[in-house]
Amino acid sequence: ELPAARPLGDDTEDVSLDFGAEEELRLRKARIRHPLATFFHLFFRVSAIVTYLFCDWFSKSFVACFVTILLLLSFDFWSVKNVTGRLLVGLRWWNQIDEDGKSHWVFEAKKVSTNVAASTEVEARIFWLGLIICPIIWTLFFFSTLFSLKLKWLALVIAGISLQTANLYGYIHCKLGGQKSISQVTSRLLSQQMFQRVSVLITTNIICKTYSHF
């Protein structure tokens, strides 16, 4: 005589299938995996904009405001290019010189798994929003300085546009695979670098002229 068949429920009633819920909870908690990098990605650029708008409240010295904003823009450029882009979205771009002394721009995108990408969705959104919106704001400042004839701020606004647009341009090429058009990118970024140098020269002249009035 064959043994009686066990009910199907006996084989599964002690098996836990909550792995999906645990994984979802873990990813939800890990959405902002780099809170410090996320903070500083926005801190320097937002601080530069706020200081530019309300610098008269902080100090009556044009030179002090000018230098403070320029330092904030420089810190922002360095941190976004070297730290936050790599941590928040797995992208980076840089310039290297080969043995022949030729300059090459390199754009890199890190390949990540689906789970890691899902856990950094919020970080990526913050990264790209900050990267795109702030250069637009500085462009609006450029037109406002022209229309209001506040030409003493023009060099600073141009420096802000140049530094933040350079990061935006580099990361867009990282995202879209800019290595296919490396020669075009090199020429454009070199022209941007020359533009930044001219902006620095203009800035230096303005500071010197301002000091000469004291």
Image (cartoon, grey):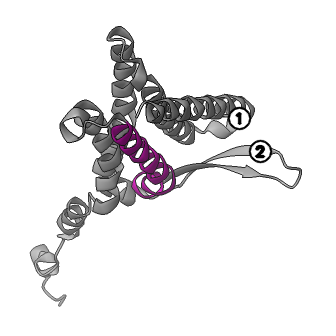
Q: Is residue 177 left or right of residue 18?
A: right
Image location of residue 65, percent across then percent down:
33, 39
Span of residues in magenta = 63-89
Tell me: residue 63, above or below residue 101: above
The local crowd at label 1, few if under 14, some if 14 to 19, many if 20 or more residues have their Cα within 10 Å, is: some
Q: Quadrant of the N terminus?
A: bottom left
Q: Is residue 182 above or below residue 116?
A: above
Answer with left or right where residue 39 lies relative to residue 13.
right
182 sits to left or right of 48: right
Q: Where's residue 18, x and y in %? A: 17, 70
User: Between residues 80 and 175, which one lies in front from this camera angle?
Assistant: 80
Q: Image quadrant for the C terminus?
A: top left
Residue at 71% of width from left, 35% of height from top?
A: 186
Q: Is residue 33 visible?
A: no
Q: Residues within 10 Å of mark 2 (few under 14, many from 20)?
A: few
Q: Residue at x 38, y 59 (%)?
A: 116
Q: Helix, strand or loop at disc 1?
A: helix
In the rendered view, would you say 177 is above or below 135?
below
Q: Taking 142 as reference, is 20 above or below it? A: below
Numbered mark located on residue 186 in the image: 1
Type of amino acid under label 1: Thr
Q: Which mark is residue 4?
A: none
Furthest-right residue in this view: 100
> Which image quadrant for residue 151?
top left
Examine the structure image and report whether residue 87 is included in the region drawn in magenta: yes
Q: Say if mark 1 contacts mark 2, CB within 8 Å.
A: yes
Q: Quadrant of residue 135?
A: top left
| Residue position marked by numbered label 2 in the rendering | 103
The chief SS type of the magenta part is: helix
Q: CA distance from mark 1 to mark 2?
A: 8 Å
- Give yes or no for residue 116 being in the magenta stretch: no
Q: Residue at x 38, y 38 (%)?
A: 63
